[in-house]
Amino acid sequence: MVQGTTSDAGKSLLTTALCRIFTQDGYRTAPFKSQNMSLNSYVTWDGKEIGRAQGMQADACGIAATTDMNPILLKPKGNMTSQVVVHGKPLRDYDARAYREEYLAEAGKIVQDAVGRLRNEYEVVVLEGAGSPVEINLKDREIVNMRMAAWAEAPVLLVADIDRGGVFASIVGTMELLEPHERERVAGFVINKFRGDVSLLQPGLDFLEKKTGKPVLGVIPYLEALGLEDEDSLSLDSRLARDGFGGSGSRPSAGEFAGQAGCDSLEKLDIAVLRLPRISNFTDIDPLYYEPDVRIRYVTETCDFGQPDAVIIPGSKNTVEDWLFLQECGLAQRLVEYASAGGLVAGICGGYEMMGSRLLDPMKVESDKEETAALGWFPFSVVFAADKRTVRVKGEAQLPGWQEKHSIAGYEIHMGEVRSEGDYARPFILAREEEPLRAMSGQSQYESAYAEGAASGDGRVWGTFIHGVLHNDDFRRAWLNEVRAARGLGPLKPLLRFRERREAAFDRLADHVRRHLDMEVIYNITGLGRKL
């Protein structure tokens, strides 16, 4: 099990690296996180919702993700309230106190059963903790750190982030606050995100081992431009602070685009992403960070809006509240003015819902407002229902003016239902819902085609429920070339293959961790031997 002294210490990526390493070494491996809190989610093959990090870790293992890998997902809604998703389906909303007092005992049984099934199916299960294992006010009932390690009989690697400072105090302090039996479970420490000469760190490492009696199993150097998705808004905000809101730290090397004429001197498209307070599934934007002709800006105020070449309205956990935020801060009006002047706008999920005429919430699923006027760009209203739609979809998109259709694969996660208000709206895509269970029973793998999303007559404004739409390489480049054409620039070839790049990133991460983590000791503490 990988635990951390703090949030954002690098637990998810170290877990991902270990998943890839054990898989490369011939072991059937699976990830597990008992309880995840994140607005960045992932849809499993059977249409269930889990944390994005566990979906990514399953991909690193080369296996299909299941809800046993993240049986409980908490999706914050504000005001100390979260939607509780159990085995991929929403259970109900809980405030923090009620969840702790009324549900944690049952949740403990659920997560123990889930990890038990994984242990029966796989040779190695790599568990990930959450936050810190020594939150004193939470320790007696927590189900995600040391109690989970005990239930799973898992040795623990304790990870600390040296980049933020105070690494020795965070490790020693964590060990001091653990119970004696919990300290025994800690197999060693990993110092993460190191920059500089490791020999200068040696006195500190010697002190740690003498003070705690535990070994430092690795000092992992900071790995630039890895290209794997962030899990939550904390990680997103860290990235934006590091990159100065421009994504520069995530840029690929010039060598990745060798052969693309003039890559180093390309004029950059300025794409603005509205930084919604309740932004969700912001990994939809990730592929744009690696396009050689794109600069991403996250916009939170009207003074940041500028004159972008295109605007993206991303997903939201609470569309109504985030739309009200855009109105209050003036960005909604700037968006209307921009689109009226011929600007290019794309909306994904919550952003698409805002493009309709009205947001209707009669059951008060998202807010206390039963009806809210929206942008009115497309002739539909959105009604928020009690049931969430979570499916994988495929289809073909061809915006007005495009010469070719482009295949789209992605997933939907939303509680809003689009209801037409009579006038014609051109669909964004003719989609088919993937039905793996039907395929297993010998029936057709896909439901009948249906019109999904909407596009303006000139194709400059479009919206869709489909997350991952920009992960489709040919479609993404076709859209960017439309943005380039509006700017008076010629088209570029689609040289970026995002999924191939992601697989290479898994291997790069695994190789990096192998070099700096004592894998012999890791294999010894797990009781495993290396496979030939």
Image (cartoon, rainbow, N blue to C red):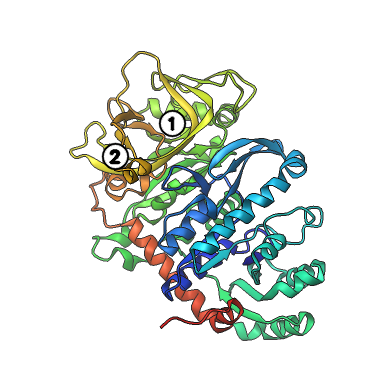
Q: Position of residue 59 (x, y in %)?
A: 43, 59
Residue 177: percent from left, percent from top = 81, 66
Position of 249 with respect to 174 (left or right) is: left
Q: Is residue 354 visible?
A: no
Look at mark 2 in the image and give the residue it sits on.
443
Q: Nearer the viewer, mark 2 or mark 1?
A: 2
User: In the structure shown, which secondary structural element does the residue marked by tag 2 occupy?
Assistant: loop
Disc 2 crowd rating (10 Å Cα; few below 14, some 14-19, many 20+) is few
Look at the image and tell me in which quarter the N terminus lies.
bottom right
Kindly identify the amino acid type of the residue bearing the numbered disc 1: Tyr
Q: Is residue 368 above or below residue 28?
A: above
Q: Which mark is residue 352?
A: 1
Categorize mark 1 by other alpha carbons within 10 Å: few (<14), some (14-19), many (20+). Answer: many
Q: Position of residue 79 (x, y in %)?
A: 71, 35
Please determine whether, in this image, residue 146 is positioned above or below residue 373.
below
- The residue shown at (35%, 57%) is 499
Image quarter hosting the C terminus = bottom left
Residue lying at the far left in this picture: please name it: 403
Q: Quadrant of residue 14?
A: bottom right
Q: Is residue 1 left or right of residue 433?
A: right
Q: Of residues 175 and 179, which is closer to you in this image? A: 179
Q: Find residue 433 and report its image quarter.
A: top left
Mark sitting on residue 445: none
Q: Position of residue 211 (x, y in %)?
A: 79, 81
Is 307 placed left or right of 408 in the picture?
A: right
Q: Earlier in the sequence, mark 2 or mark 1?
A: 1
Q: CA distance from mark 2 to mark 1?
A: 32 Å
Q: Residue at x 23, y 53 (%)?
A: 493
